[in-house]
Image: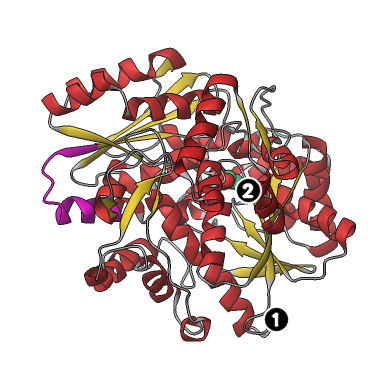
């Protein structure tokens, strides 16, 4: 059988196999890596009774070499089956008429755990398969949640080190605290004066910097990415789309084969894109509802076909979605047009002018599968409060955006299709806002944790308990312009 290979969305990358794609993280032409093979449609009936780990094995091995399925099962067991997640990994709950898949039950209480618990195992496995002897230095830019999840995933993992860059004023106090108390001999957390986009852009540039490439060679190391530009972030996320759906079938909420909608709080678009891949693998998804905060660049794109990054950047109460350069949209555009030269043209336009507009063909496809909307900050709080009063379910601010935008969509279209909301964070990651939403009272973050717990009886996730009393280990802050130089210095120290 032919080996499954990966190519760049911008067309100028030698084909890579799965291991190489994971280790390289991004296309050498600045594009993102995508499968160069047709993914086979899955027989849902055969997947119906599988435990999450076995389901993950079936889905993920679609993307890996054919002879390593049992290895993949072991990696999935290590990630999801050693007590860091609940037994069923992602519980599926219900609030009113909305099904909610809780993607935040892992080691850092946010959905990033779904992929970042597994990515380090992909990395070490790939290093082994390739006989790679260099160390890998993982770079991650974070809008709050990727950082902690990546740190937990990579801490003390042999052959790796990790540098996390976060905007000092762009993450919630709990998110920041989770990162700066991180232990591990190979971890580094760096605050930057700038926003998430600045951090992500600098990290992307680092991969293609000749100066850093030369330094890497001298110091026997190479760089890789833990952001959702790495295809190893996307593949594990396909699994919970199947799992959510199959759980509803098992619970007799839907018939096997019945179409559903997913509503997804979106930023870098990695979560939603994994769903689009699931749809291409035969999961009966009618529509994706792409939900944004006041940084509503995706809403505009899905409504007009025009991506315009020339706009004000807002810091909001859903900070993990404060993003204007939504990396994974590039992959979607590639999947829809299957024309790397066209994608390259769009991305060059984006780099040069901050704007691109897809052609009619692509836009028609966009409209067939995606609907988009957004909530501003006040509305987010209103939705958290309303959902709690109406259904007793406590949403975090990000998930509330998915919920609220779905409710708007339902009202406008009267679409009765059963809808699954992907819940991306525990309400205790944003306790100040969530408590304010249900009580009207503003409290300091950690007082809000206690008050929220008292008022709702929703328990505080273990990873968030007592973090305010832990020792701060990381205090470095640098300018956004010096990220690349900083990385260079770090390589020299190896
Ligand atoms: C990362 C994140 C998102 C956005 O996910 P993308 O894959 O970047 O679209 C939404 N909510 C929370 C809580 C997150 O951490």
Residue 90 in view in this figure: no
The residue located at (27%, 45%) in the rendering is 23
Q: Secondary structure at mark 1?
A: loop
Is 51 above or below relative to 71?
Answer: below
SS state under label 2: helix
Comparing 353 with 441, the one in front is 353
Query: Which of 164/208 is in front?
Result: 208
Residue 372 in percent (x, y) is at: 73, 48
**Sequence-wise, which precedes: disc 2 or disc 1?**
1
Q: Quadrant of residue 186?
A: top left
Q: Residue at coordinates 72% horizontally, 34% vertically from top-left?
A: 443
Which colour assignment does the render follow? secondary structure
Q: Is mark 2 within 8 Å of ligand 1?
A: no
Number of marks in the image? 2
Question: Would you say residue 238 is visible in this rendering?
Answer: yes
User: Residue 252, percent across and down?
Assistant: 67, 85
Q: Is residue 44 magenta?
A: no
| Cα gap from disc 2 to disc 1, whole angstroms | 34 Å
- Horizontal relation, residue 254 to residue 203: left or right: right
Splitting the image into 4 quarters, where does residue 37 fall? bottom left
- Residue indicated by mark 1: 253
Q: Residue at x 25, y 66 (%)?
A: 2
Residue in front for this viewpoint, 109 or 280: 280
């Amino acid at each position: 059988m032919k080996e499954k290979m990966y190519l760049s969305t911008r067309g100028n990358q030698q084909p890579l196999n799965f291991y190489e794609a994971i280790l390289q993280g991004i296309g050498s032409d600045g594009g993102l890596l995508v499968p160069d093979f047709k993914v086979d449609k899955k027989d849902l009936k055969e997947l119906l009774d599988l435990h999450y780990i076995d389901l993950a094995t079936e889905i993920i091995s679609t993307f890996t070499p054919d002879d390593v399925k049992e290895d993949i099962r072991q990696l999935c067991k290590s990630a999801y089956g050693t007590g860091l997640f609940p037994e069923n990994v992602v519980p599926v709950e219900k609030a009113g008429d909305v099904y909610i898949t809780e993607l935040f039950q892992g080691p850092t209480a946010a959905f990033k755990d779904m992929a970042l618990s597994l990515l380090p195992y992909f990395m070490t496995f790939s290093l082994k398969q390739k006989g790679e002897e260099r160390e890998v230095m993982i770079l991650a830019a974070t809008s709050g949640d990727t950082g902690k999840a990546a740190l937990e995933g990579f801490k003390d993992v042999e052959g790796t080190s990790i540098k996390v860059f976060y905007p000092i004023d762009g993450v919630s106090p709990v998110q920041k605290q989770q990162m700066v108390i991180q232990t591990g001999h190979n971890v580094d957390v760096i605050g930057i004066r700038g926003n998430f986009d600045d951090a992500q852009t600098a990290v992307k540039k680092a991969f293609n910097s000749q100066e850093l490439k030369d330094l890497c060679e001298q110091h026997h190391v190479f760089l890789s990415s833990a952001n959702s530009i790495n295809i190893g972030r996307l593949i594990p996320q396909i699994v919970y789309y199947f799992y959510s759906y199959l759980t509803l079938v098992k619970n007799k909420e839907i018939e096997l084969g019945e179409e559903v909608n997913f509503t997804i709080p979106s930023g870098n678009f990695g979560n939603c894109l994994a769903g689009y891949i699931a749809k291409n693998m035969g999961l009966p998804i009618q529509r994706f509802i792409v939900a944004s905060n006041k940084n509503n660049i995706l809403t505009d794109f899905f409504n007009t076909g025009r991506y315009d990054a020339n706009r004000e950047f807002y810091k909001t109460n859903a900070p993990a979605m404060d993003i204007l350069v939504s990396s994974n949209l590039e992959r979607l555009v590639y999947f829809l047009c299957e024309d790397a030269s066209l994608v390259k043209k769009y991305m060059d336009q984006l780099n040069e002018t901050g704007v691109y507009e897809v052609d009619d063909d692509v836009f028609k496809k966009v409209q067939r599968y995606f609907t988009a909307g957004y909530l501003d900050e006040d509305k987010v709080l209103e939705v958290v409060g309303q959902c709690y009063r109406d259904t007793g379910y406590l949403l975090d601010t990000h998930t509330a955006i998915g919920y609220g935008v779905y409710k708007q969509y339902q009202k406008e279209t009267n679409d009765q299709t059963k809808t699954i909301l992907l819940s991306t964070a525990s309400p205790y990651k944003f306790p100040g806002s969530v408590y304010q939403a249900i009580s009207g009272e503003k409290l300091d973050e950690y007082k809000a944790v206690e008050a929220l717990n008292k008022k709702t009886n929703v328990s505080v996730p273990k990873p968030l308990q007592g973090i305010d009393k832990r020792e701060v280990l990381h205090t470095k802050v640098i300018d956004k312009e010096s990220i690349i130089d900083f990385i260079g210095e770090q390589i020299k120290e190896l």
